Image (spheres, rainbow, N blue to C red):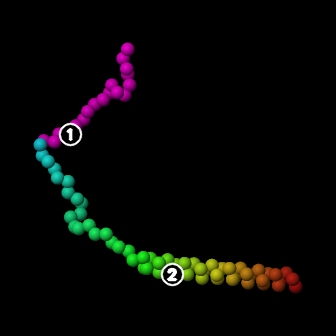
Amino acid sequence: MENKGFTDNKTNIETPSDGVIVAEKPLKNGRITSNRVDINVLKSKLQETESKEFKKNIYILSSLVLGLGILGIYLSL
């Protein structure tokens, strides 16, 4: 019996090297430097955005409480 599977259909395709050695060059020739981030700057930005959100939430909550108070007074009359 013959085994007819994927193993019988092997084809090896190789690219010709022509004896030329090609050196791989990096895309950027400059020196790689890591940009450091100051943790205090990140904390201040986070605190600033949180304070804006807190003020917005307080405004919404106070307007809801005021609305409920006005509705309660109106319905009690």
Closest to the observer, 35 or 1:
35
- Residue found farthest to the right: 77
Mark 1 belongs to which amino acid? Answer: Thr
Q: Residues within 10 Å of mark 1 (few under 14, many from 20)?
A: few
Q: Quadrant of residue 18?
A: top left
Q: Is residue 26 above or below residue 13?
A: below
Q: Is residue 29 above or below residue 75?
A: above
Residue tagged by mark 1? Answer: 15
Q: Position of residue 4 (x, y in %)?
A: 38, 22
Residue ID at (28%, 31%) = 11
Read off the magenta span: 1-18
Q: Position of residue 76 (x, y in %)?
A: 87, 83
Mark 2 belongs to which amino acid? Answer: Glu
C-alpha gap between disc 2 and disc 1: 58 Å
The rendered magenta stretch, by its main secondary structure, is classed as: loop
Q: Position of residue 50 (x, y in %)?
A: 54, 78
Residue tagged by mark 2? Answer: 48
Q: Residues within 10 Å of mark 2 (few under 14, many from 20)?
A: few
Residue ID at (76%, 80%) = 68
Q: Which element type, helix, strand or loop, lies under badge 1?
A: loop
Q: Nearer the viewer, mark 2 or mark 1?
A: 2
Q: Quadrant of the C terminus?
A: bottom right
- Residue found farthest to the top: 1
Q: Position of residue 51 (x, y in %)?
A: 55, 81
Closest to the observer, 4 or 73:
4
Task: Answer with left or right where residue 51 lies relative to residue 37.
Answer: right
Task: Answer with left or right where residue 50 lies relative to residue 1.
Answer: right
Instruction: Determine if the magenta segment contains residue 4.
Output: yes
